[in-house]
Image: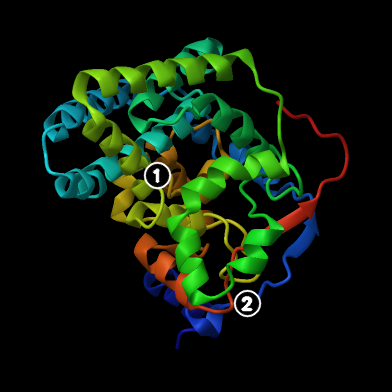
Amino acid sequence: MTSPKKKLLRNFAFLGPTRKTRHIHSPRVVGSRGESAFAIRDTFLPKYPEIKSLMKPDPNLIWIVIMMVLTQLAAFYLVKDLDWKWVIFWAYAFGSCINHSMTLAIHEVSHNSAFGHYKSMWNRWFGMFANLPIGVPYSISFKRYHMDHHRYLGADGIDVDIPTDFEGWFFCTTFRKFIWVILQPLFYAFRPLFINPKPITHLEIINTAVQLIFDVIIYYVLGIKSLVYMLAASLLGLGLHPISGHFIAEHYMFLKGHETYSYYGPLNLLTFNVGYHNEHHDFPNIPGKNLPLVRKIAAEYYDSLPHYNSWIRVLYDFVTDDTISPYSRMKRHQKGKVELD
């Protein structure tokens, strides 16, 4: 006979969390700074020394990004004379997948996975190149805020991945949560200005200038339809889209006591294994290509954790379950010294 605990985890892993496995998190759960990822690293590396060999750049990432940029350039050309309805159709059906995937390539590059830590500036320039088909400059800013997310996960006023109090208060019904999912890229873009504004750096200015020049070139050479296709692909791909399930799947507390979740479904093939999120937070220096090996090496640990096999199911459950909202995150009051980029 299967124990209730194993049955609960099995339902969560293969069917998505049911109402019986949910826990109400409103108002927001508040805790102190956790050190679990650091503790896991200290425990795992002596036990599984082969994990350390996975901490190396992924040169294939460079060629994949180049091919993705060239693919979108070809798409910009192909849509320039289409009817508007087909421009929007292909922006969602094709461009959205490329552009969302590219944001996750930039996530990889922010961890220096392309050229390694000893060539960190090469990664910054390459991130700007990867940024081009997205249309909006964000590669450099993302790196600055994403490092805070890893160092101070859930820290109040630091981790801008945490929704604002307004988001948690207002987007609390099925319809409003549906709108929130559609508008996610806008909230991710503007949330840092309210939670943790930072002074602009010279690299951010360069990132913005390069991106605007590229956008202007696309407009003058290919026309308004190509420009709209590019921007719509980003907006639609980061909103109500199957891949966008990872935004919610990663840290929303569908189960009490579990702050981070992995996803082991097929969309990892398009997202540089960002679904292996427990593994990523435990070992952020390991490129996405090698995260499945981390799980394989330490299977006794990772296989026992609740995980997802469907990002679409995550989106559906988030929108329809009235016990889950943007408030369903662990929020911490940071203690001690804080070092921000």
> Which residue position holds label 1?
292
Q: Earlier in the sequence, mark 1 or mark 2?
A: 2
Q: Is residue 327 visible?
A: no
Q: Residue at x 50, y 23 (%)?
A: 112
Badge number at residue 66: none
Q: Is residue 197 visible?
A: yes
Q: For the residue labelled by badge 2, is the local secondary structure a helix, a strand or a loop?
A: loop
Horizontal and vertical percent position of residue 97: 28, 44
Q: Residue at x 24, y 44 (%)?
A: 91
Q: For the residue labelled by badge 1, is the local secondary structure a helix, a strand or a loop?
A: helix
| Identity, as a three-letter code, of the amino acid under mark 2 | His
Is residue 71 found left or right of 116 in the rendered image?
Answer: left
Horizontal and vertical percent position of residue 162: 64, 52
Where, by quadrant of the figure, is residue 21 drawn?
bottom right
Callout 1 crowding tier (Cα within 10 Å): few <14, some 14–19, many ≥20:
some
Is residue 181 found left or right of 268 in the rendered image?
Answer: right
Where, by quadrant of the figure, is residue 253 drawn?
bottom right
Which of the pair 189/38 is nearer the observer? 189
Which of the pair 60/122 is nearer the observer? 122
Q: Nearer the viewer, mark 1 or mark 2?
A: 2
Horizontal and vertical percent position of residue 316: 40, 71
Toward the bottom, the furthest residue is 1
> Which residue position holds label 2?
23
Q: How far is the residue under mark 1 from the one under mark 2?
A: 29 Å
- Whether the residues at callouts 1 and 2 have beta carbons within 8 Å, the answer is no
